[in-house]
Image (tube, rainbow, N blue to C red):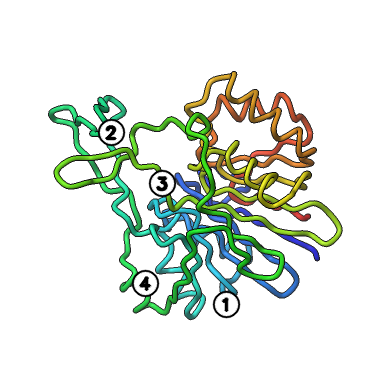
Amino acid sequence: MKTLITVLAENSVGKSGLLGEHGFSAFIERNDEKYLFDTSPGISLPHNIKLLDKSLKGLNKIIISHGHYDHTGGLKWAVREAGGAEIVAHPDMFCRHSACSPKIEIRHQKIEIPKGEAVRYVGCPYTQAELEASGAHFNFFDHTEKIAPGLWFITGIERRPEYIPNDSRLVLPYQDHFVPDMINDDASLLLECEDASPILMLGCAHSGILNILAHVREKMGIRKLRAVIGGTHLMFSDSQDISLVIERLEEFSVERVGVSHCTGLKAAVELAKHFGERFVMASAGSVFEL
């Protein structure tokens, strides 16, 4: 089965005329099937999809990696453009994802917000009811599940705490205070290939890329990956952590590493230095034919 993956939206662009914005969206074509993985904040998506000569008409599913605005902002437009669509997501995608300054203190899992620091909502800009009124219908999974032939929605995985990205900006309102947001709705996508190893697609890897790779290996029995594409959330990682990610990727004999969005410049440089010709920045306009 031929798989064509086109990055529709990302922080950077790889083709003249495209728009870049903080977020991620990818278009997946497999024979006659079409899937949209995330929708970016939504500003660049209508422009870029037209310029890249793609169409959401006949879309099979929209798959959401998590409920942050930079992955869900284009949902309403995408649903209407598709003429209605099934959305596959974790049931917590509509929780009150918020963000604050990294200058915070955590005391007994209760976050102390410094005086004068604002907390802003960074979750999905639409309610479930709004999206359903636009033609969406939801299929929620809180565990890894096969959602289409050769297509796995990976979520609800076991997480080793030391492998979870250290992003103290992300918080959730709880009663009269805030608690760390573990992004429990984080999800990834695994695409099986008939003549090759699977492709792993990441939205932001808030579960931790090492935890995701461990799940793929230990729970799904996968020992080799054709490609890993998407956001790795390594922007706060040091060289030692990045080296461990490189080691794990090599254990899968990964043929192509295409990182984007929340990977961070330092991590991208170290990955590029190690993987050489196997590395590519998955900017808007990038195409992976696998």
Could you tell me residue 142's position as x and y percent? 48, 59
Residue 131: numbered disc: 4
Q: Nearer the viewer's eye, disc 3 or disc 4?
A: 3
Circles 3, 4 touching at the beta carbon (< 8 Å): no
In the picture of the structure, the residue carrying the numbered disc 3 is: 183
- Kindly identify the amino acid type of the residue bearing the numbered disc 2: Gln
Closer to the camera, 90 or 123? 90
Could you tell me residue 204's position as x and y percent? 51, 44
Residue appearing at x 43%, y 76% in the figure: 136
Residue 109: numbered disc: 2
Of mark 2 and mark 4, the one earlier in the sequence is 2
> For numbered disc 3, what is the local secondary structure?
loop
Q: In which quarter of the image is the N terminus?
A: bottom right
Q: Quadrant of the C terminus?
A: bottom right
- Kindly identify the amino acid type of the residue bearing the numbered disc 3: Ile
Q: In this view, does 244 lie above or below 164?
A: above
Circles 3, 1 touching at the beta carbon (< 8 Å): no
